[in-house]
Amino acid sequence: HWSGHTGCVILAPHLVNCTKKDLGLPHTSQATERQRRDGMCWTDENEKYNDGGAFKITCRDKRGVVVTLIADNYYGYCKKEVKTQISYAANLFGNAEEEHAGGAVAFPSFDLGEDFSLSDYMRTVDHRFLGVIERYSDLFHLQPEGYGIDKTYPDIYYVPEDVHIDLNSQTVTWENAAGPQQIELQPGITYVLPSGYKVEMIKPFAGMRWRLIGTNAEGTFCHKPCTVSGGGKSEISKSISDSMIAAPLLVENLKDDLDAAWGVINHDYSKRYKNPPATGKQSRPLLSPERSLGSVVSMLTQKPEFTDEYNEWLGTIKSSVRDLVFLIKRFYKPDWGEDWRQRFSVDLINGKPGRQLIYRRRRIITQFLRVGFTEDGNWRTFTVRKDFAPARKIQTEDDISASLVVPAPLIKGLHPEVKNPSLKFIKNCEYRLFQRPDDAIHRGYDHKTESDFSGKGLFFSNYEPLDRPTVRTMLRDSIRFEQFTEPMRKTLEDFAAADSPDFVISSHQPRIVDGKATKNPRYLQNRPDLEDPRAVYLATLGKRFFRRLTIDAPVPMPVTSVLAGRRNNPPDEKAGIRALAVYNPIHYQELPELFMDFVASLTGKSPSTTGAGSEGALTKGPFNAILPVHDLNAALVSFLSTGYHGFTTAAGYVGPKFRVDHDISLLVPEVWSRMFIHERDPKYLIENGYLEKVEDFEHEGRTIEASRLGYRITESFVLTFFGRIFSAPDTVFSEEMLRPELQSMEAYIDGLDNTVETQRRVALNYFEDGGVEMAIPPLKALLHIMAYGEYEGKTLRDPEIRRLFDRETMLGSDWYQQRIDAKVKVDTALCEAHIASLEAFLANTNYRSEHERLGIRARLDAAKAELAHIRTPAYRGNLVGTIGTDPELV
């Protein structure tokens, strides 16, 4: 491999009968204490290794050569070994990590309604079509009317900045020097403006109106590292569409509701604040073009900063009237004036007014989004804003990621508002993803999985093979069969009508084991970004246009937000599983608390694991080829170098009562992509009351260490940022969900005790294996505090300990400079090895004909030039701000 390392995995399931003696393990009398503790020795020479079950044996050396034999054929075990071999190479190479992570770039999308002009949404439109022609003319064929058609994808059109798109007339119009221009608006075409903003004509759900959907040029790279099984690694990159349902918008009595809406629209809002902001501006009318729909949602949501009288008045507004006001605001045009009532109607049914609202002779359909379940298992659904559309996502990670850190000054073409001193770049190491589609057991819910299952050549694990009589019985159950999506229905119908093959797989039916469906069905899914190159092309194109990068310049897409996932569960006494439901939907932790969490990787009960406890999501758990402290060192230096802020999101449960599955994992990228960059800064969030600190407290004579949870989102956070998605954000999370201790103080305290005890137990492992002595100073201090409560007489609250986690402290330390020196040493040795290999190849006269064909001499010259560069002070200087290499591994 180019990094100088070699890995090999051999699957040999027939070797499960090997004995411990065959595999070179010692007799008990000659074993070490640890070998005896772990069962890595024998008393009877016929003892089978691992009792005849699956096992692996590994041989590795310091050069980076590793060979593993696995006595099993389960894909998941092989994948784990590939992970650890990549991690092995990353640690030896330096400035690289293998990460157990999911991720996606989320581009916020919006329902633009029936017409669109960019100037209605942005006061300053300074990207010009002339600039597009000047910079990117090689991308498209310029048409006589003055727009472009992409050469690679003819369904991508480039249109001028002053374009007006009208859905009702299905026209795209603009003016240029030749006069007014017009082309047809068509579904299936993406219209790209000079700023990279994209507009499409889309019909979201059956029965819904066609609408214009706009998508931002810039997206948010949401990185989900150190995420335990069931924590939402895959879900962060999935579309939220499957969690949405559509239903008619109902009114109780149209005349009364319109009258009430009129009262809301014309209400005097100037006195709503307890302490009015000193802007000197008059309150804008509700229907004013200067007031956004988001502003109206905020204004009609109860808040602490509003007067008691105003909040009381808001509580009297019926939900149907609120939805009607939002709808009127969504469609309102200034030329309507006060004559907007006639545009809304209901049908007359049996001589009486109906309840389904009609706008311009079309029935209005509203959308709802699921966020968890009630205690009896029903969906908790909430109305989304009329201008909401699911974000477009480009998957970047699913499970095995390779990453590196680059100092920001060395990167050209970044988004102008990105201020991190160093940035992380990530590569997905997988071509196919070993997915566990939890929600696919519900027929018709997981559209992507059912689409995949209708294809050919899929690899399945733990799915029940269905024979032809079984499938024909399914077809006769017409009502339930119709719940499948069309691709899955067709696959099953075709199988039932054919003579072969003998079996088929259905997405809803995992393998039956001991009379029960397994909780861990899997299949290999092709990477969505490789299946849909057009989406990646558009995403890159939008960023290029927005940043005005040249056609041949790289478009850097570094991580922008870190959103790890944690699996939570209520107590399960029968299974012997303790409570772990102490998080509200989103937490922020400063680096010391975050890494205490990462070190332990505590997880609740997950379908991928046999129980709950410490999983080793960051350190590869029992699969690691080196001491796990090296992974922790690299991860902590990475965080210190980049300055990323660590947020964690809940999966499974919020508190012991509220089941949420992966709904928050799906929802958070929508929220984060709609936040401005400065709004994601914890300092801003804390100062403005969007995050509250979780404090230690006394209970029955002892201190409960709740402060390890860091900060958690508040009602204000939900109202402001979830209010960009939901029309009634105050209803999405109850006070019990934001403060899980209100659900059960007993479960909350036990969950905190469980957390602290697990962190202590895991930290002690680093003392047993000697890893603590190889830990970088901030990590060493943290491990002592986790294990023993203090380090050199200081606790986590002491400023001296906190300062160890400052970037400037790290950069000025001897230990960090040693990491940089070690990286220079590794790069020098690797380059010297390349040169030696090329020279040896050139010296072999048997390959003389290949020397010229492969350009070996030019490669040798390039390698020598690179070696000379590595030996310069400038090369070392450019490494400051990176991870470097752990000196213990050099």
Image: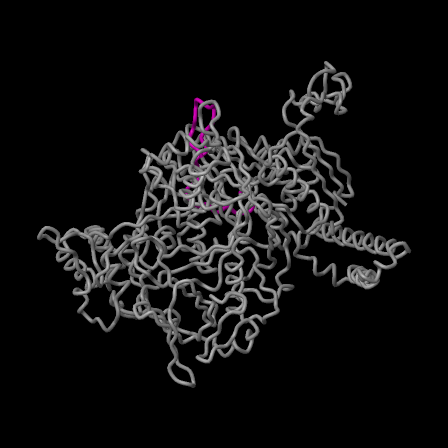
**Percent x, y for residue 578?**
46, 28
Position above or below: 210 against 122: above
* Residue 375: quarter of image: top left
The outermost residue toward the top is: 44
Query: Secondary structure of the magenta portion, mostly?
Result: loop
Q: Is residue 584 magenta?
A: yes
Q: Is residue 645 magenta?
A: no
Which of these two is toward me, 283 or 73? Answer: 73
* Residue 202: quarter of image: bottom left
Residue name at image x 69 percent, y 19 percent: 48
**Percent x, y for residue 70?**
67, 32
Tell whether 472 sits left or right of 57: left
**Percent x, y for residue 146?**
45, 79
Q: Is residue 797 visible?
A: no
Tell whether 146 sits left or right of 205: right
Quadrant location, the C terminus: top right
**Percent x, y for residue 639?**
59, 50
Tell whether 172 sits left or right of 358: right
What range is drawn magenta here?
A: 569-593
Q: Is residue 569 visible?
A: yes
* Residue 811: quarter of image: bottom right
